[in-house]
Amino acid sequence: MDLELARQVLAIKALARRNQTRRNRIRLVGLLLGTALGAVWFLVAPLSSSKPGSEFAIAAVGGFFLTDILIQLCASTLFPKRARCPCCGHDWEIREGRVMALEMPTWDKCPGCGLMMSDLSLFLILKRSES
Ligand SMILES: [Zn+2]
């Protein structure tokens, strides 16, 4: 692997982490907005549910999932640059909540084309080029 490709792979992996952070922040905002709506719901109609306080949980979970749906629907707007393999175009976006082996940070090679992508290998390539 040449130096330029190693730098490109590192940049794409960093993009995947930034996209993951942005996704998590949007989900957190949805969770907080849902909780705030739950508070309003509780204040407006405190006896509306059989278990007092369950309005918060229902609204928070609802806000989280609605935000997740919004992320899926507006993915191209929210994430204009997607993390993809520079050689084969395989999706390198970080997917949480699935099998660990399917998460990009654990990959040593691209599942699409076998391109080396472990941090240690890339670090060694960059280090070798400096000396
Ligand atoms: Zn690939």
Image (cartoon, grey):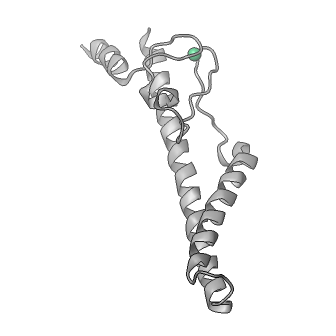
Q: Residue at x 69, y 86 (%)?
A: 48
Q: Quadrant of ligand 1?
A: top right
- Give the quarter of the figure containing the C terminus: top left
Q: 121 or 127, which lies in front?
A: 121
State the image quarter where residue 130 is shown. top left
Q: Is residue 40 above or below residue 79?
A: below
Q: Is residue 78 above or below residue 1?
A: below
Q: Position of residue 94 (x, y in %)?
A: 53, 36
Q: 122 or 24, which lies in front?
A: 24
Q: Residue at x 42, y 18 (%)?
A: 108
Q: Position of residue 86 (x, y in %)?
A: 58, 19
Q: Residue at x 65, y 53 (%)?
A: 68
Q: Is residue 61 above or below residue 116?
A: below
Q: Position of residue 87 (x, y in %)?
A: 59, 14
- Give the quarter of the figure containing the N terminus: top left
Specify whether 45 is left or right of 112. right
